């Protein structure tokens, strides 16, 4: 099974809302990633978790708060977002987070902030 | 960071035609992957190819790590090949995507 799942598929939220994105994998991977992709742009790395510990934070604003409750699950908590945060949010996983590993991506959550 | 450049940025093909997409990178890398992003946003793994040549059906890829480039070949293109093709490289434990090639295959 090489599947990464993400919920919800679509999310519309106001600037004062709090919402969460969820990502799950059952490949036994120990590294998980959040990426943000704006329209007509490539994905950009936001966060990396390795063995449930945050290993990389690409200077992401604090209104995005990641959480890794266990090695299969990755959440992204959203609070007080801005309209420019509207994007496709992609989750990925890999074996351990090493530099030579294949990353497997989920289908993404399309977020619209009004 | 590392620079990852893809060419051409846009490509229009007639169904059945062949094409070559290129990815240049500015430094040595640990990993190189080719992805196809479908219109719904799903990134589909095509190849993990830090060096050498691989083939999978109508697709093949070659990476020449010493010269810092990779090529993706699509033969006998089909309308379902349409979408954006990204190469992505791993450099110092971070994954960097190129800007992509948008392919439109017309029937």
Image (tube, coloured by chain):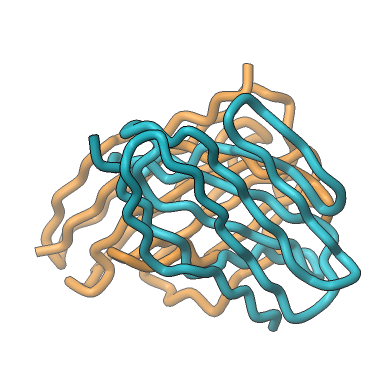
Chain colours: A orange, B cyan
Q: Left or right of B80: which side holds A97? A: right
Outermost residue toward the right?
B66
Quadrant where the N terminus of chain B sits is bottom right
Q: Position of residue A46 (x, y in %)?
A: 53, 65
Front-most of B58 and A53? B58
Q: Position of residue B61 (x, y in %)?
A: 70, 46
Q: Position of residue A43 (x, y in %)?
A: 47, 61
Quadrant where the C terminus of chain B sits is top left
Q: Is residue A98 visible?
A: no
Q: Left or right of B42: which side holds A86? A: left
* Residue at figure coordinates x 55%, y 46% from the top left: B35
Q: Position of residue A60 (x, y in %)?
A: 48, 74
Relative height, residue B105 to residue A82 (above, below): above
Relative height, residue A76 to residue B1 (above, below): above
Front-most of A43 and A21? A43
Q: Left or right of B77: which side holds A7? A: left
Outermost residue toward the top?
A1
Front-most of A8 and A38? A38
* Residue at figure coordinates x 81%, y 43% from the top left: B53
Q: Is residue A35 visible?
A: yes
Front-most of B76 and A25? B76
Relative height, residue A35 to residue A29 (above, below): below
* Residue at figure coordinates x 71%, y 45% from the top left: A31
């Amino acid at each position: 099974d090489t599947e990464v799942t993400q919920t919800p598929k679509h999310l519309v939220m106001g600037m004062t809302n709090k919402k969460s994105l969820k990502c799950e994998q059952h490949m036994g991977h120990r590294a998980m990633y959040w990426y943000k992709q704006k329209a007509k742009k490539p994905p950009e790395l936001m966060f990396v978790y390795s063995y449930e510990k945050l290993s990389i934070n690409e200077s992401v604003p604090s209104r995005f708060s990641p959480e890794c409750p266990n090695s299969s699950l990755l959440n992204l908590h959203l609070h007080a977002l801005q309209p420019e945060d509207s994007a496709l949010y992609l989750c990925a996983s890999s074996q351990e987070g090493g530099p030579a590993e294949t990353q497997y991506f989920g289908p993404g959550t399309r977020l619209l902030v009004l | 960071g590392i620079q990852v450049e893809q060419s051409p940025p846009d490509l229009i093909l007639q169904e059945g035609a062949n094409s070559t997409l290129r990815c240049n990178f500015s430094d040595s890398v640990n990993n190189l992957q080719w992805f196809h992003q479908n219109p719904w946003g799903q990134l589909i793994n095509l190849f993990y190819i830090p060096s050498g040549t691989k083939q999978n059906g109508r697709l093949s890829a070659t990476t020449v790590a010493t010269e810092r480039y990779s090529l993706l070949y699509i033969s006998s293109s089909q309308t379902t090949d349409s979408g954006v093709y990204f190469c992505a490289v791993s450099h110092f434990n971070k994954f960097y995507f190129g800007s992509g090639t948008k392919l439109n295959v017309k029937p």
